[in-house]
C-alpha cells in the first residue's frame, strides 16, 4: 500500500467554517480513505474582520505548517483576501521541510504561490481549494485537487503542464498587484496562465497593462488565457472581448499569445504546478 | 487686462457629449468672459467601444494639443478609462510648447499626469474635469479648476500645496496600476495625496500593498489620505477604516502618514499641481 499523504490546511486570507472543513474531510475519506489525512489548523476558523485571524496568527499558522516535516503539503483552504498581509520575515524562516513541500491554492493564495516561487521554496501549485465546495460541482474540483496531492493524478493537470515547459498560473487581478513588489516571481521563460472572476473588462484590461510591464512577463514564453467568470456588464460595451484584450497587451509587449488555458474560478479548474513538470 | 488663457480639451479615456462641452463653455464664459477660451478637440466626442476614439485617435489628439503653442493648458475633459492605452512613443515627440504647458485632470487621467511627471514635461495638475458637472455642485468644481487655470487662484489649491513641499496626487486604484510600469513617476520626497471612489475597502487595502512597494513612494515625505467616496459594503466588516488601512501600510513601509488631504472624487476636490509650488 502507498504511504499516507499528510496535508495541513491553513487560511492566509479569509476564514472557513467548521462545516466546510468537515465536508472536505468527508470527501477525502470517502474517495481516498487511509491514503490521505487532512489537518485543519485551528487558525482556519479564526475571524478578525475580513481575515482568518490577525496577520500574526495567519503568518504563524502558515510558518508552523510549512516547517512541520510531518506534512507533505500545505493546502490553502480558501482565498478571499489577505495573503499579502503575511509577515515578510517568515519567508526567511522557512526550513528544509518547507522546501520539500507542495503548496496548493489559487485566487488570493496566488500571493503566496508567487512569493514561494520567487524564493524557490517548495512546489507552488495553482488549483482548487476546499472553498470551491460552494461552487456547482465543487466536489469534483476537490477530488481533482486531492487526486493530484495524494496520487499525482496526471489527468488533474492543465494540458499545457504536460508539455514539460515551465508554467505558472495566476488570477489576473492578483498578479497585477504582485508585479512590481518584492513578491513578484521571475516568470521569464514561463507559459503564464491567467484567469479571473467578477471583474469588468475594463479592469481586466487595466490589470493587463500592469502585468505586461513586469520584466519577467515580458520575457515569458507566452500567455494563455483561462476562463473569466461572471464578467459584469459594462455601462458601454468595452469593444473587445476577453481574448482580444489579452492579445492586445501581448502584441504591445511582443509576448506570444498562446491560446486558452483550462483554468478558472470554477469546478473545472485544472492543476498547474509551477515550473517544469518533473517526475516525482 | 490680463491676457486670454487658451485651453485645449481632449479625452484620453472615455468620451464626453456635446452637451457637456457646451455647458462647460457656458460656465467658462459666464465666470471668466474673454479671459479664457476653451477648445474642445473633436476627438472628445468620438466613440470606439469604451473609449473616446481609437488608441491612435486619442494619442494623436493629445500629442497635437500638447505640442500646439497656441494653448496654455491641456484639460482632460473626462477620466473613465483608457489613458494607459496611449502610444508610448508620443512622449518622445512632445516639444517645447508641450513642456511649457499645464495638464489638468484626475482619476484615469492620472496615468498621464504620472507619465508627464516622470518625463519632466510641463506641469501635471490633479484637479476637477468637465465630467464633474455630473456631480452635485459640479459647477463649483469647474469654477475652481478654471480659476486655477485662468487666474492661478491660490484658494483653489489643496492646503498642503501651499507648504511649498513637493506634492503629487492620485487615485489609489490608478496609482496601484502605475507603479512598477514605465509610467511610474519618482515620488521620492513628495507628499503623496490619495483618493478613490466606489472601491471595497479590501481593494483599497490591496492597492496600498502595491503602491507601498514603489521605490519612490517608500522614500516619499509622507502620504495624505483624501476622500474615499461611495465605498460599497463588504460581505463582512473589513475590520479597519480607510484611514487605518493607509496608516497600516505606511507603518509597514516606514513612510510617514501625514493625515487627511482635501481631494476626492467630488465637487470639493482641491487642486494639486505636481512638484513644489513656484510663483508663476
Image (spheres, coloured by chain):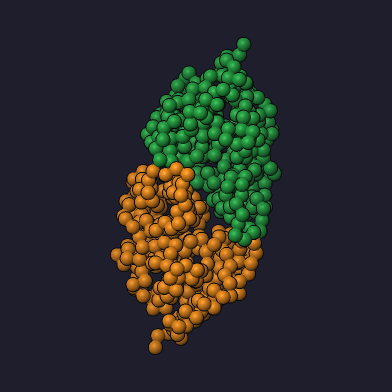
Chain colours: A green, B orange
> Can residue A16 be spotted in the picture?
yes
- Residue that sits furthest to the front in the current view: A19
Asked which quadrant contains residue B160, the reply is: bottom left
Q: At which x and y percent is residue B112? A: 50, 63
Residue found farthest to the bottom? B1
Residue depicted at 56% across the width and 48% down the height: A211
- In this view, the residue in front, A90 or B50, is B50
Number of numbered callouts drawn? 0
Reply above or below: A261 against A23.
Answer: below
Viewer-side residue, B133 vs A96:
B133
Q: Nearer the viewer, residue A37 or B214?
A: A37
Q: Which residue lies furthest to the left in this view?
A: B163
Place of residue A216 in the rendered image (x, y in percent of width and height, measured from the top left): 56, 43
In the rendered structure, the answer to whether residue A250 lies left or right of residue B138 reads: right
The quadrant in which the C terminus of chain B is found is bottom left
- Which quadrant: the N terminus of chain B? bottom left
User: Eyeballing the image, is B197 above or below B70?
Assistant: above
Instruction: Please say whether residue A101 is visible from this viewpoint.
Output: no
- Residue A179 location in percent, x, y? 51, 45
Residue A238 locus on image (x, y percent): 63, 58
Determine the residue positioned at 47% across, 19% down. A69
> Going 43% across and 35% down the picture, which residue do you hit?
A52
Rendered residue at 52%/29% (across/down): A20
Amino acid at each position: 500500500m502507498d504511504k499516507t499523504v499528510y496535508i495541513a490546511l491553513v487560511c492566509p486570507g479569509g476564514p472557513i467554517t467548521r462545516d466546510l472543513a468537515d465536508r472536505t474531510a468527508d470527501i477525502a475519506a470517502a474517495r481516498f480513505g487511509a491514503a490521505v489525512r487532512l489537518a485543519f489548523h485551528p487558525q482556519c476558523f479564526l475571524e478578525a474582520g475580513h481575515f482568518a485571524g490577525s496577520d500574526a496568527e495567519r503568518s504563524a499558522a502558515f510558518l508552523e505548517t510549512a516547517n512541520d516535516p510531518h506534512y507533505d503539503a500545505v493546502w490553502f483552504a480558501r482565498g478571499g483576501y489577505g495573503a499579502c498581509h503575511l509577515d515578510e520575515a517568515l519567508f526567511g524562516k522557512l526550513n528544509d521541510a518547507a522546501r520539500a513541500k507542495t503548496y496548493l491554492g489559487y485566487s488570493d493564495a496566488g500571493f503566496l504561490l508567487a512569493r514561494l516561487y520567487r524564493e524557490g521554496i517548495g512546489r507552488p501549485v495553482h488549483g482548487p481549494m476546499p472553498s470551491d465546495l460552494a461552487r456547482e460541482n465543487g466536489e469534483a474540483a476537490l477530488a481533482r485537487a486531492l487526486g493530484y496531492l495524494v496520487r499525482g493524478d496526471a489527468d488533474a493537470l492543465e494540458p499545457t503542464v504536460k508539455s514539460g515547459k515551465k508554467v505558472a498560473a495566476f488570477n489576473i487581478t492578483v498578479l497585477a498587484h504582485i508585479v512590481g513588489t518584492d513578491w513578484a516571481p521571475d516568470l521569464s521563460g514561463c507559459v503564464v496562465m491567467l484567469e479571473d472572476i467578477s471583474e469588468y473588462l475594463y479592469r481586466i484590461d487595466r490589470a493587463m497593462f500592469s502585468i505586461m510591464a513586469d520584466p519577467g512577463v515580458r520575457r515569458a514564453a507566452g500567455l494563455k488565457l483561462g476562463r473569466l467568470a461572471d464578467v459584469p456588464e459594462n455601462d458601454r460595451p468595452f469593444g473587445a472581448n476577453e481574448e482580444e484584450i489579452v492579445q492586445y497587451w501581448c502584441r504591445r509587449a511582443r509576448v506570444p499569445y498562446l491560446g486558452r488555458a483550462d483554468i478558472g474560478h470554477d469546478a473545472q479548474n485544472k492543476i498547474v504546478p509551477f515550473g517544469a513538470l518533473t517526475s516525482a
